[in-house]
Image: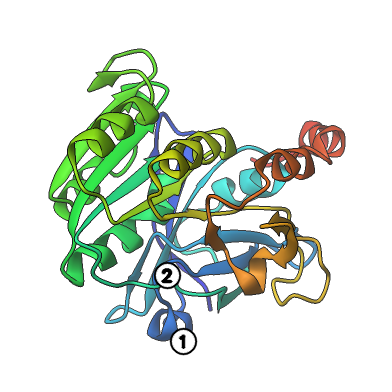
Amino acid sequence: MFKIVQREEMAQGTIVLNEIEAPRIAAKAKPGQFVILQANETGERIPLTMADVDTEKGTITIIYMIVGKSTSLFGSMAVGQEYYAVIGPLGKATHLEKKGKVVCVGGGTGIAVLHPITRGLKEVGNEVITILGSRNKDLLIMEEKMAKVSDTLHICTDDGSQGHHGFVTDVLKDVLEKEDIGLVVAIGPVPMMKFVSMITKEKNVETLVSLNPIMVDGTGMCGGCRVSVGGETKFACVDGPEFDGHNVDYDELSKRLQAYQTEEKISMDACQCK
């Protein structure tokens, strides 16, 4: 079970795509939902939102950046090898409805999470304007796939090597000035989602973000993935992972994501993930 049937290195090898045999998960998965994966019996449980699902092949696709020991272990696995466990689908699916014109904003590996949501919004009849950002053109992922599910695609790079020289928020401001937008979906680094939400709040445009806090069991039992939304404690695994972007406490989320940086570095330094 959970055999890797396709592996692709993206963004200069720092981001990896795995297509995994998981027919029971593929049969039920919806846009916005995630799975928890373990490389081996003693491995860390890592939550990753699915980038794609193929019900006919019975596969799911995940895309992750190699940043620590566990993702390094994932990255060392070859086609034909199997994950010890893949659990899901977990979390609430994205609520897809016709809003008119919608904007989908993605950065980094958040673009992978955004892909099925963008496709779903397009399929229910929305006009989709997509804005993708990365530090440079070599780190940009899924450009062609996102173009296929969008009516308009804008590319932004920090260094100006492709598309707009600047941030996704620059293009978003321009779109909001010119278009009547019914919904913005933003998925990517926490600072990006924070500033997108600040801009859309000023314009009173509904905004969804997908959060990635530290998570353990994925069922709401451990409380590890707690986030503050509108002054209330929510669990990303069962209440999310998507929330109203205008109400998320991004500063608290950032602090919690940095809580184990020292331990993560020690673990990564000791890892022989080859």
122 with respect to 91 (left or right): left
Q: Could you tell me which residue is drawn at 71 percent across and 45 percent down?
A: 253
Amino acid marked by disc 2: Thr
Residue 226 position in % (x across, y down): 76, 60
Residue at (46%, 86%) from the top-left corner? Answer: 24
- Location of residue 59 by image quarter: bottom left
Q: Nearer the viewer, mark 1 or mark 2?
A: 2
Residue labelled with disc 1: 24
Task: Give residue 155's position: percent from left, percent from top.
Answer: 26, 31
Total tally of numbered discs in the picture: 2
Give the class, few, some or many, for how many residues have Cα within 10 Å of label 2's Cα (few <14, many ≥20).
many
- SS at circle 2: loop
- Tell me if residue 187 comes above or below residue 120 in the rendering: above
Residue at (71% x, 77% y) in the render: 219
Residue 109 on image: x %, y %: 46, 44
**Quarter-wise, where is residue 189 in the image?**
top right
Does residue 220 show up?
yes
- Mark number, residue 94: 2
| For residue 89, above or below residue 249 | below
> In the rendered view, would you say 70 is above or below 31?
above
Residue placed most toward the observer, 96 or 72:
96
How far apart, in angstroms, are the residues tagged by discs 1 and 2?
A: 20 Å
